[in-house]
Amino acid sequence: MPALALWRGRKPPYMEGMSHDPASIDNAICGPLKGGSHEPTFAGAPSFMRRRFTKDFSEADVVVWGVPFDCATSNRPGARFGPAAIRRASAIFDGDPQYPSRRDPFAALAVIDAGDCFFEYERLAQAPKLIEEQAAQIVDAGRHLVTLGGDHFITLPLLRAHAARHGPLALVHFDAHQDTWDDDGSKISHGTFVTRAVAEGLIDVARSIQIGVRTVAPHDYGIEILDMDACCALEPGGIAARVKARVGPGAAYLTFDVDALDPAFAPGTGTPVAGGLTSAQALSILWRLGEVDFRGMDVVEVCPPFDNSDATAIAASAIVQRYLQLLAARAPLRQG
């Protein structure tokens, strides 16, 4: 019998005078499905925002999931450690009303952390299909999937899983790069996922938009591009208005590469580019996109070996935290 179970209903001697039950520690393991936890931010199992760790998503509205894959990166490796870093950083958000909604999103949403995608690092060619199949199990069950990366290649199999259920999606893509380099289908690269998504009909280019771009690529495929000059001129409200006008009322998918942020705010990424969005700008834009019918999202390219004081992981976890607030505002989310 677990030691704490012996004391169920009364506090063990070392807890006398304390305000919380000892079982309130490790909310990720033994806590309720809904509601925030109140354990110390520096202790406990680091699931995303202390959500319950479980592979059973039958009662969940939202499934947070990690894909620790960085074998497609073209510069600095290390994004395989991104999901763990984002989870660790997310502990600072739990237990309090969330900014800017001032509400507990978990009062409205049942959110779980389903751990990480499984694939064998020795069999790289199998990874795309395994990511797609495991994502599809969640998406096809009608659960809203939020993915922690990993490098940006993982968005391609994620889009395949989402498009199989929802049809072609508007892509809302925050990035310093367009990721539209040539790919005949034989590459595993974080710089070609948009090219493949267009070729496979996974996204509706007429409703897709890229924000924060400040590099040059060979193709745009008809996707609207808000480069950094445009972003600086428009400010967050104007950027959000352009996104909503482009996407319209149809289904959309959000992918956020943290190198959309300036390296001052996200130093821990594989291909940093100077002159990007501030974390405040990015979060403000995202908060204004509540009308967009997002069916899933990912945040990618967090590279902890280059992350000063967890700044990038904190920014990435804040992006997901804000996205969950958007979802909570339009709950229920289950689609059967």
Image: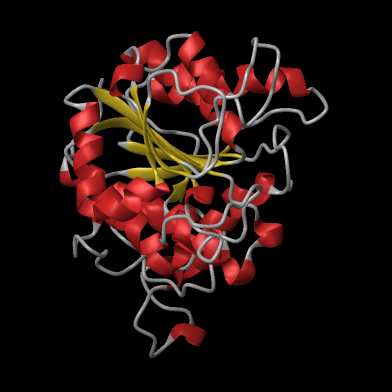
Quarter of the image for residue 312 reads: bottom right
Q: Is residue 8 visible?
A: no
Decide: is 47 above or below 241: below
x 62%, y 32%: residue: 190
Task: Give me the residue at 51% from left, 67% from top.
Answer: 4
Count numbered badges in the picture: 0
**In the depicted view, which residue is nearer to us: 225 or 66?**
225
The spot of residue 168 in percent (x, y) is 35, 14
- Side of 83 relative to 250 (left or right): right
Q: Position of residue 91 (x, y in %)?
A: 46, 65
Quarter of the image for the C terminus: give it.
top left
**Front position in the image: 3 or 117:** 117
Residue 154 to residue 315: above or below: above
Which color mode does the image show? secondary structure
> For this view, does 133 lie left or right of residue 210?
right
Q: Is residue 15 left or right of residue 189?
A: left
Position in image of residue 145 (x %, y %): 40, 33
Q: Is residue 198 visible?
A: yes
Q: Residue pushed farthest bottom?
A: 17
Q: Which residue lies most toward the right here?
A: 122
- Across and down, in percent, residue 331 comes to 18, 39
Occupied quadrant, residue 247? top left
Q: Residue at x 63, y 63 (%)?
A: 307
The quarter of the rendered structure image containing the N terminus is bottom right
The quadrant holding residue 192 is top right
> As drawn, is 251 to the left or to the right of 130?
left
